[in-house]
Image (tube, rainbow, N blue to C red):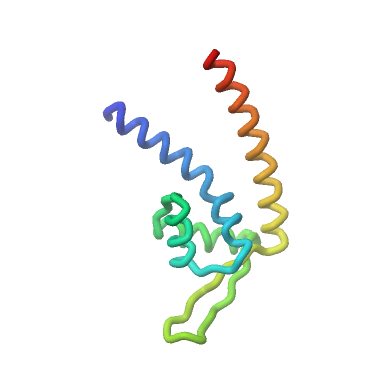
Amino acid sequence: MSNNQIVENLVLELRRGTQIIIVLNQLKTASYGYNLLQELTSLGISIEAGTLYPLLRRLEKQGLLMSTWDTSESRPRKFYILSDFGYEVLYELKKAWKEIDQSLSHIFRENIQ
């Protein structure tokens, strides 16, 4: 495996670690899968459909998301939105993220000097 491949894989792991908090944050407003993919892409967040859809189902199964079907158009769409528990978890994840960010910023600052 080349050095570039190693770095690319490590970056991919870092991004995967942020997908849950990103998806939960975006689902404070109801959205369906394809629309969510487009929103994330417009924000510069790359996530594959094959990753997003299983993630949405898992988060729903864990009680973090609720879903409803919209059958008013010719193509039914499953809309997801944060549950009350999802809001609690998102709050805790954001809090943890801020702590991690502060720690890393401190470590990186020390290593630069």
Residue furthest to the top in view is: 113
Residue 83 point in image, percent of width and height: 68, 64
Could you tell me which residue is drawn at 64 percent across and 60 percent down? 64
Q: Nearer the viewer, residue 101 or 12?
A: 101
Q: Which quarter of the picture shows residue 4? A: top left
Q: Nearer the viewer, residue 111 or 81?
A: 111
Q: How many marks?
A: 0
Could you tell me which residue is drawn at 55 percent across and 13 percent down? 113
Please say if 66 is above or below 100: below
Residue 77 point in image, percent of width and height: 48, 76
Please say if 5 is above or below 44: above
Residue 109 point in image, percent of width and height: 58, 20
Quadrant location, the N terminus = top left
Residue 26 point in image, percent of width and height: 57, 58
Could you tell me which residue is drawn at 44 percent across and 56 percent down? 42
Please say if 67 is above or below 46: below
- Left or right, 18 with respect to 66, comes to left
